[in-house]
């Protein structure tokens, strides 16, 4: 998963002028301590120059101002024609360390780039939420502090420095390692690029619109399994073919990197002109399906609901790994057959964004109407005040 | 730091020893970077209070604020130079150094200031850039240069030779050329800003000068002893520059009048108290202009003088003038009768003033006031008639004998008498800068006149004054400068201290004026002094290297130090007219080029011409083609032919080390791996150094076993 951006390809004066009147988001120039001293020095020398009409002081003033201008020009040249690409390697899991890479390229022909930093940020968002001013916190009195204190819990951010010189045409990768706190949709963005180059007088921050939204899967949890409560072996036409490596061939699919060469169907590949892979059915029929309901009436405690998501995700992964996951579904949504890894990932993506829903008859009806699928259907119920239990065929199969 | 400390040596504020100590301390810390770490912590804690106490004591003791501040600055620089510092301390050093340089510049208005502040700016910018880049390699944190209670690693292993080697390795001509171009850009930009910064006069005088008491450096005061002027002539330094708006009217042999000395007593001439009185010299004024009443010279050029500090508080002037303008209000006294301008204090910096309508080469100085007094000399007056001879009777007799030998017959006119007396003096005495006055009783000047010993200008002038007064002619000594050289590059007079001179003015009642008589000037020289312009300047023109350097100094004074609101407006007008003219020139050039191309196309064509044209076109297309196809490549900055210094250093360590494995792997990664995967090079090289040292320390027997 990646996102690209670049700055400085074209230069327009109107952009500069508008930028002065109406700075872009995250774009600011702050004087550092050196800068404040230099500006104060310039004021002092300027005042003395006008009071004394001394051209020596005017020379000193001109040099100081020229240094400030040079600083701005060099800073602009330093940030010009930079390109970057955000690289995130999914999956992201709550509670597990994740690495976000930023590939920076200096597209200038002659000038190297020095002393940059990038401001990374990650914050949970709701799908389809509208943009609003981030600084607006709606709360009263002491609640403001409570609202502010929540911000670091869910958001993460860090400044990552480019430690080496970036030669003309050169590339460098900056890595930001962080741990997503919760499951959900996470917006990872590079808020801005900053630099103190060349003399450290001004801290220049330029906003860059580089963001990508990635789902964060629920954190894995430990659970107990109960003996004797396994799936039953259905008979006859109740058996369903699903992908495996042991049984009969059920389909052909396109070759993907990582597939075993032994599975290539050479004759079909020769006919179609592209590599095709044999897909076999699994021998074992002791498969089960997962279905969970997000009924808010059932899952009244948020912590317990989060545990449900983690439990379901962990079970789904374990069962898929064991080749025993047939299908999975959430609430009134369709039961999706888990044939490929992509099916499982899709299910985990849905788990990442699942929220407790108000009670609906549709969900209950679906549970009742599943007919034969209710056999070996793994469902979940609260287990006490904090725990979650999984049931199969009415038996408690596992619990957290 | 050393650059700013050096300014103190020409500030003349009695801080040379402290500057020397500060410079020595900084040099010591440079040579032994580990030394500051050995300073105990209590010394650091006591340093600041001690410095403040020293400043308070210094101020109380000397009562001069600016020298005390300069010494405080030196102490702070010494302390910072002798201690390991963090990034914010670098800024302190820059500010302290800048203060010293600016103060020195304001107080001296020297051209050296320009060079110094430029070098200082380059060093300061280089330091700040290095610090910024170093901080970025440490992840935005300043490198840890200070270690409490110990010697930091960088100081313990500081090796200047190695550092210079590294700098040589990474030096690339493109980088150096770019830095130089950038710095020239800064200078150009600051020059542009200097021209464009709006100027308006707040009618305030220099604030820094008030805090320093400048010592008089020469003998141009209102009291001199014989030999003072000659002593000045030993110095070849520039006393002042004089610009003239029309060089065609430049005199060949100018006499720059500064001081009039009328009283002879105790073997020396001085300006009498009555001459200095309010009746003659007037009251003190605080103005920027002097406008004498009743004197109007038309068509005379405008002169601009740049009088160096330490010459005198009396301003050199050639003669009567219409107006004299300073850059800013000054405290001065002006004598219309003597045509002298005396500032209240010795100027601490170069003093610039413009004189309009000046009688540049008049050998006569009309003085109607003295003429009136001379006519009514029978009436007692406190004002001097400049006839006094404070001599013993024997001396007066001896003087009378000499006078009688000059005019034995009929009475001569004062001018002719003075010329005869001068000729007599020249016949009897040679010229020498090291004269000997015969020992004996009586007045030394009379003794010298009675001898045949050689003498200098003061003795000649003094003797002529005594002779003239003995003959009943009012006379006085005038000191100043004579002549000077004409700088061929900047087109101005350069008058050096070696041009210091003393001559005489005798009163001619017929002309109602003082006549200039230089007893050392020969007749041919007097005749040549009437010449003007190029012919007059031909013999004075200086084309030496010193003249070239002085022309830069004059440029500095003319265009930089003397730049004011009027100059700014003149510059803007000049730029505007140059822009207009450039537009015309451009249009004319384009039209001429178009006509040329047209005539080229319409001209008769033959094969040979066709070939020549094709060759020219090919030659013109060749350069862009070479660039476009990459045959000529403009290499980017930072990609020198020598490659990365980190890779080269890693390569060197790999040839010397064969273990440990982890270190070798790191070195190999630095040598061959892509830069983003590098471990921190400084850490790896530090480990390599340790490994190399441990190998060297290993006992010889172990080596033989292995």
Image (cartoon, rainbow, N blue to C red):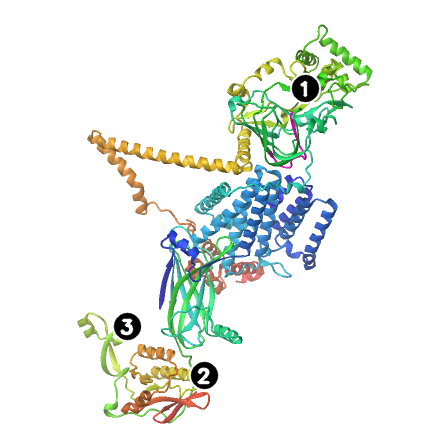
Q: For the residue labelled by badge 2, is the local secondary structure a helix, a strand or a loop?
A: helix
Can you see residue A89?
A: no
Q: Nearer the viewer, mark 3 or mark 2?
A: 2
- Which residue is identified by label 2? A303
Q: Earlier in the sequence, mark 3 or mark 2?
A: 3
Give the Cα separation between the discs numbered 1 and 3: 113 Å
Q: Are marks 1 and 2 in contact (CB under 8 Å)?
A: no
Residue A54 in picture, x, y percent from top left: 58, 41
Tag 1 subunit: B
Q: Nearer the viewer, mark 1 or mark 3?
A: 1
- Which residue is identified by label 3? A256
Q: Are marks 1 and 3 in contact (CB under 8 Å)?
A: no
**A302 to the left or right of B11:** left
Residue in front for this viewpoint, A59 or B605: A59
Residue A297 in picture, x, y percent from top left: 40, 88
The magenta segment is B339-351
Q: For the residue labelled by badge 1, is the local secondary structure a helix, a strand or a loop?
A: strand
Residue B103 sits in which quadrant? top right
Q: For the residue labelled by badge 3, is the local secondary structure a helix, a strand or a loop?
A: loop
Q: Is residue A253 above or below residue B563?
A: below
């Amino acid at each position: 998963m990646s996102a690209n951006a670049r700055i400085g390809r074209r230069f327009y004066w109107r952009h500069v002028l508008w930028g002065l009147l109406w700075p872009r988001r995250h774009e600011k120039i702050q004087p550092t301590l050196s800068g404040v001293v230099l500006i104060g020095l310039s004021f002092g020398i300027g005042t003395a120059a006008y009071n004394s009409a001394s051209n020596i002081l005017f020379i000193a003033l001109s040099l100081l101002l020229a240094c400030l201008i040079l600083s701005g020009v060099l800073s602009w040249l330093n940030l010009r024609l930079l390109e970057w690409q955000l690289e995130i390697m999914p999956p992201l899991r709550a509670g597990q360390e994740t690495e976000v890479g930023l590939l920076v390229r200096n597209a200038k022909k002659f000038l190297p780039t020095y002393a940059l930093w990038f401001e990374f940020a990650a914050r949970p968002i709701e799908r389809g939420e509208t943009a609003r001013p981030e600084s607006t916190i709606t709360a009263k009195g002491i609640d403001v502090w409570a609202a502010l204190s929540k911000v670091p819990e869910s958001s993460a951010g860090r400044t990552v420095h480019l430690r080496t010189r970036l030669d003309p045409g050169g590339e460098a990768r900056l890595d930001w390692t962080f741990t997503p706190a919760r499951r959900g949709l996470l917006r990872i963005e590079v808020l801005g690029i900053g630099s103190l180059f060349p003399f450290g007088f001004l801290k220049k921050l330029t906003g860059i619109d580089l963001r990508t939204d990635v789902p964060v899967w629920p954190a894995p949890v430990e659970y107990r399994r109960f003996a004797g409560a396994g799936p039953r072996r259905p008979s006859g036409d109740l058996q369903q073919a699903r992908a495996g490596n042991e049984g009969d061939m059920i389909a052909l699919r396109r070759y993907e990197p990582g597939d075993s060469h032994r599975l290539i169907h050479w004759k079909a590949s020769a006919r179609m002109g592209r590599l095709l892979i044999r897909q076999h059915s699994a021998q074992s029929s002791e498969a089960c399906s997962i279905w969970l309901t997000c009924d808010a009436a059932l899952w009244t405690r948020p912590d317990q609901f989060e545990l449900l998501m983690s439990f379901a995700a962990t079970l789904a992964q374990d069962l898929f790994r064991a080749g025993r996951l047939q299908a999975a579904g959430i609430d009134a949504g369709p039961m999706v057959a888990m044939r490929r890894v992509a099916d499982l990932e899709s299910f985990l993506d849905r788990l990442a964004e699942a929220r407790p829903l108000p009670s609906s008859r549709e969900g209950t009806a679906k549970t009742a109407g599943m007919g034969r699928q209710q056999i070996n259907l793994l469902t979940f119920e609260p287990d006490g005040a904090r725990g979650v239990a999984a049931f199969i065929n009415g038996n408690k199969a596992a619990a957290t | 730091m050393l650059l700013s400390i050096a300014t103190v040596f020409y500030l003349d504020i009695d801080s040379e020893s402290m500057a020397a100590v500060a410079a020595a301390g900084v040099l010591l810390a440079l040579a032994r970077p580990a030394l500051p770490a050995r300073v105990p912590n209590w010394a650091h804690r006591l340093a600041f209070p001690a410095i403040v106490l020293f400043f308070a004591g210094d101020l109380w003791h000397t009562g001069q604020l600016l020298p005390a501040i300069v010494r405080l600055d030196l102490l702070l620089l010494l302390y910072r130079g002798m201690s390991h510092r963090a990034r914010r301390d670098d800024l302190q050093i820059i500010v302290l150094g800048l203060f010293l340089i600016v103060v020195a510049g304001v107080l001296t208005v020297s051209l050296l200031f320009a060079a110094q502040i430029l070098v200082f700016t380059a060093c300061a910018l280089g330091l700040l850039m290095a610090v910024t880049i170093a901080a970025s390699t440490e992840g935005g944190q300043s490198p840890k240069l200070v270690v409490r209670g110990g010697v930091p690693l960088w100081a313990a292993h500081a090796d200047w030779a190695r550092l210079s080697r590294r700098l040589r390795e990474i030096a690339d001509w493109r980088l150096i050329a770019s830095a130089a171009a950038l710095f020239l850009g800064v200078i150009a930009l600051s020059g542009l800003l200097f021209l464009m910064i709006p100027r308006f006069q707040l009618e305030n005088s220099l604030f820094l000068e008030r805090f320093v008491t400048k010592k008089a450096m020469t003998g141009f005061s209102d009291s001199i002893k014989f030999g003072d002027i000659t002593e000045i002539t030993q110095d070849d330094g520039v006393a002042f520059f004089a610009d003239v708006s029309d060089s065609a009217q430049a005199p060949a042999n100018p006499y720059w009048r500064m001081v009039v000395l009328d009283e002879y007593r105790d073997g020396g001439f001085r300006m009498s108290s009555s001459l200095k009185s309010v009746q003659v010299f007037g009251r003190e004024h605080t103005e920027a202009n002097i406008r004498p009443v009743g004197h109007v010279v038309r068509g005379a050029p405008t002169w601009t003088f740049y009088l160096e500090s330490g010459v005198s508080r009396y301003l050199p002037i050639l003669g009567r003038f219409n107006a004299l303008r300073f850059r800013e209000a000054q405290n001065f006294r002006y004598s219309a009768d003597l045509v002298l301008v005396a500032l209240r204090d010795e100027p601490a910096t170069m003093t610039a003033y413009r004189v309009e309508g000046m009688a540049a080469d008049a050998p006569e100085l009309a003085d109607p006031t003295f003429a009136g007094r001379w006519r009514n000399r029978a009436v007692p007056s406190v004002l001097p008639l400049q006839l006094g001879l404070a001599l013993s009777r024997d001396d007066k007799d001896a003087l009378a004998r000499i006078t009688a030998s000059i005019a034995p017959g009929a009475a001569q006119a004062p001018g002719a008498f003075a010329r005869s007396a001068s000729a007599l003096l020249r016949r009897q005495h040679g010229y020498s800068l090291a004269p000997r006055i015969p020992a004996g009783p009586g007045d030394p000047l009379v003794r010298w006149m009675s001898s045949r010993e050689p003498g200098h200008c003061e003795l000649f002038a003094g003797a002529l004054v005594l002779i003239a007064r003995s003959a009943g002619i009012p006379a006085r000594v005038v000191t100043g400068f004579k002549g000077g050289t004409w700088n061929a590059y900047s087109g101005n007079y350069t008058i050096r201290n070696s041009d210091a001179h003393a001559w005489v003015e005798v009163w001619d009642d017929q002309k109602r004026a003082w006549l200039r008589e230089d007893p050392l000037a020969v007749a041919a020289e007097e005749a040549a002094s009437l010449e003007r312009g190029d012919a007059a300047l031909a013999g004075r023109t200086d084309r030496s290297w010193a003249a070239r350097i002085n022309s830069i100094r004059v440029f500095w004074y003319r265009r930089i130090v003397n730049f004011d609101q009027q100059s700014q407006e003149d510059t803007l007008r000049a730029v505007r007219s140059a822009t207009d003219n450039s537009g015309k020139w451009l249009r004319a050039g384009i039209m001429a080029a178009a006509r040329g191309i047209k005539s080229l196309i319409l001209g008769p064509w033959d094969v040979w011409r066709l070939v020549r044209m094709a060759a020219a076109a090919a030659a013109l297309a060749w350069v862009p083609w070479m660039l476009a196809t990459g045959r000529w490549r403009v290499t980017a900055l930072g990609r020198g032919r020598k490659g990365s210094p980190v890779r080269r250093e890693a390569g060197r360590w790999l040839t010397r080390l064969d273990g440990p494995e982890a270190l070798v792997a790191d070195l190999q990664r630095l040598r061959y791996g892509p830069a983003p995967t590098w471990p921190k090079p400084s850490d790896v090289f530090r480990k390599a150094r340790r490994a190399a040292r441990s190998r060297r320390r290993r006992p010889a027997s172990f080596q033989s076993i292995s």
